[in-house]
Amino acid sequence: MATAQEQKIETNKEIQNTNEPIIIETEKKEETQQTTSTTPVSNQQLSNEQSSTSESTKKKKKKRNKKKKDNTTNTPNTPNTSTNANVNGNVNATASSNVNVNATANATATTQLNRPVQFEQHIRNLGNWSIDSKQTWPPTLPVIRQYPESDFKEGQILAYENNLARVTSQESKNKERFYHSTLADARLGAEVHRQVRKYAQSFIRPGIRLIDMCNQIEDKVKELIVAKGLEAGHGFPTGCSINHVAAHYTPNTGDDTVLQADDVMKIDFGTQINGTIVDCAFTVAFNPMYDKLLQAVKDATNTGIKAAGIDVRLCDIGEAIQEVMESYEVEIRGKTYQVKSIRNLNGHSIGSYRIHAGKSIPIVKNGDTTKMEEGEFYAIETFGSTGKGVVHEDMECSHYMKSFDCGFVPVRNPKSRQLLQHINKYFGTLAFCRKWLDQQDQTKHLLALKNLVDLNIIEPYPPLCDIKGSYVAQYEHTIFLRPTCKEVLSRGEDY
């Protein structure tokens, strides 16, 4: 396309070309007038010549006017005056800008609909992850370096449905400042959790050894969170309970269990920053016959999140969860099962360095009228089963945790005393597993650990199982009850 300066030069040339014949005609006219003034003629001839001259002049004026009209009606591609050139240039520029705006809008819409994904999600009932411009792939950059100003992403913000006055209350808005540092720690832990589970979902496949899978997840947590003793690290061991096992299973050293294509596995791991724990879980399944089971539990968890809020009774949340959960049926290998809420598993409040802080959120209707309060963290988790809907302790124990309320207890056995010192230093009141003790050179610890359990210093948390042959699914998010709203800290693109 020609530039504006070139268009002006061409326009000036055309103006000169159109004016030249007019100048020539004027000169000829002057010459004829001079000849007529010098040549003697009669009055009759003079009047005839004047009349003919005026008629010819009128005709020429008409022709000029006609030309001007034709010029004004020319298309923008053939400008005849500088004014027309400017007008046409503005029209073209406006049209071009409109095209650019429309192209940008279309590109944005296309990006939203077809956003670039990091990898194609192969786990059932989970969404795709978009590419994160702040992080490498595979993720290697600590999250704290991605956000040097500590402006970590907010979680999903939800209003209190039955307490809308809190949204506009100036007092509530002022209270938000008191939770700034706590929320910064929680959001950092939640972002680490999102990036680690995104990475985990890329490599979890049938045929992987569970112990290798857990090690990869835990190593990545330590890398992205920049593990530093009790200041930053794991919230608890990585759970990978399979099929009828609902919770609290992670492989001990020497356990070579392999993930199968028809398994239903619950991945449950946590992060903690300065004692602020983020607890989040999802279910891994590859066979579409489990889709209804997974959908039932995910809907039930989202229902619990929606029902939660300041001054809400825990029993009301449980009733809402159960109603949604048990409205689903699933057909597995030709047999139809009603999805049941596991009535002796619960969500829970979370305290500083304390994964279970005292309040339990039922997933069935019960009579607990305890209310949620402002400034509390909760793990909203639900379990749906095709079995009896009741779990019991079974299998070899892997999860342990020091009793939060344990005072001083004399320990006479030297090995037990040394193990307790190690637990206090590296785990405090956070949950740990036997595999971690082995990795920290605390081999042959079983008898010493049993002695600490017998003294009620350490509490065991064995796997919780429904009947064999059944399938259990789980979804979980951590929420925080802010003064003006509730924040789903661990919400991600996957679920």
Image (spheres, helix red, strand yellow):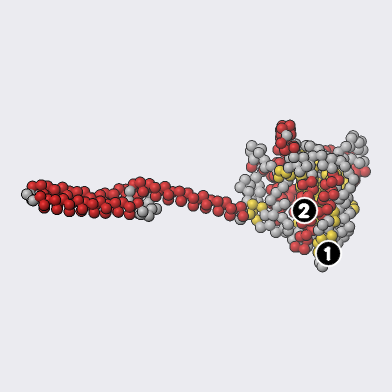
Q: Residue 26: x, y in percent?
A: 19, 48
Tell me which residue sits at (90%, 45%) in the image.
Answer: 367
Q: Residue 473: x, y in percent?
A: 80, 55
Q: Tell me the distance, in whole angstroms, between the alpha carbons under discs 2 and 1.
A: 19 Å
Q: Are marks 2 and 1 in contact (CB under 8 Å)?
A: no
Residue type at numbered disc 1: Thr
Residue type at numbered disc 2: Asp
Tell me which residue sits at (83%, 56%) in the image.
Answer: 326
Residue 269 disc label = none
Q: Quadrant of residue 153?
A: top right
Tell me which residue sits at (89%, 54%) in the image.
Answer: 390
Let me know if residue 467 appears in the view: yes
117 on left or right of 344: left
In primary-sequence order, the first of circles 2 and 1 is: 2
Disc 1 secondary structure class: strand
Q: Residue 127: x, y in percent?
A: 69, 54
- Between 490 and 144, which is closer to the camera in this rendering? 490
Let me know if residue 398 appears in the view: no
Tell me which residue sits at (75%, 54%) in the image.
Answer: 213
**Neighbour tally class for label 2: few under 14, some 14-19, many 20 plus, Cα within 10 Å:** some
Q: Is residue 459 above or below residue 295?
A: above
- Give the labeled residue for mark 1: 336
Residue lying at the far left in this picture: please name it: 40
- Give the labeled residue for mark 2: 299
Q: Residue 105: x, y in percent?
A: 55, 51
